[in-house]
Image (cartoon, rainbow, N blue to C red):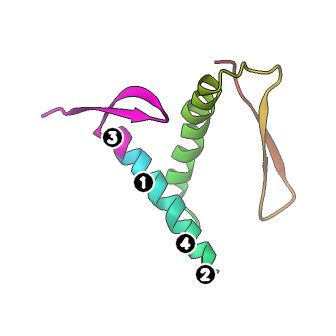
């Protein structure tokens, strides 16, 4: 049986199937687990597959939703900067216009 659930994600109406909800809850649980472990000095890495999903969701959904919610137009050459916490490397990721 296919189940379609109407939910509000990031303040925007969206129709999502169970896989999207499971993905979001998996990311949330992994981040909160890491945060709790980090608080006691025993953080283990987030599984790579979950981390990849989280980064993709951040750029494909969250960043664009935030821009739309605040009615902020895309800036020219808009990008995010990532700094390695275990080294000196930095990465820049361009954000496409909405």
Give the alpha-carbon distance from disc 3 to disc 2, as whole Å: 32 Å
Q: Evaluate if marks 1 and 4 touch, with contact meaning CB atoms under 8 Å apart.
A: no
Residue occupying the far left of the picture: 1
Please give the label number shown on residue 26: 1
**Which range of residues does the magenta coloring cover?**
1-21
Q: Which residue is mark 2?
A: 40
Q: Residues within 10 Å of mark 4 (few under 14, many from 20)?
A: few
Residue 31: within the magenta? Answer: no
Q: Evaluate if marks 4 and 2 touch, with contact meaning CB atoms under 8 Å apart.
A: yes
Q: Evaluate if marks 3 and 2 touch, with contact meaning CB atoms under 8 Å apart.
A: no
Q: Quadrant of the N terminus?
A: top left
- Secondary structure of the residue carrying tag 3 is helix
Q: Horizontal placement of 7 versus 29: left or right?
A: left
Which image quadrant for residue 18? top left
Q: Which label's residue is closer to the chain start, 4 or 3?
A: 3
Q: Horizontal placement of 30 versus 87: left or right?
A: left
- Looking at the picture, how far across and down is residue 13, in whole percent? 40, 26
Please give the label number shown on residue 19: 3
Front position in the image: 50 or 78: 78
Q: Is residue 26 above or below residue 12?
A: below
Q: Horizontal placement of 8 versus 46: left or right?
A: left
Give the alpha-carbon distance from disc 4 to disc 2, as whole Å: 7 Å
- Looking at the picture, how far across and down is residue 35, in whole percent? 58, 67
Q: Which residue is mark 4?
A: 36
Q: Which label's residue is closer to the chain start, 1 or 4?
A: 1
> What residue is drawn where x is 56% and y is 52%?
51
> What residue is drawn where x is 78% and y is 32%?
79
Residue occupying the far right of the picture: 88
């Amino acid at each position: 049986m296919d189940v379609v659930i109407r939910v509000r994600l990031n303040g925007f109406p969206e129709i999502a199937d169970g896989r999207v909800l499971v993905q979001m809850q998996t990311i949330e649980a992994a981040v909160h687990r890491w945060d709790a472990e980090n608080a006691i000095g025993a953080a283990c890495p987030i599984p790579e597959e979950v981390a990849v999903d989280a980064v993709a969701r951040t750029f494909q959904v969250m960043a664009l939703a935030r821009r739309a919610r605040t009615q902020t137009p895309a800036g020219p050459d808009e990008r995010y900067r990532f700094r390695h916490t275990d080294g000196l490397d930095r990465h820049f990721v361009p954000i496409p216009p909405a």
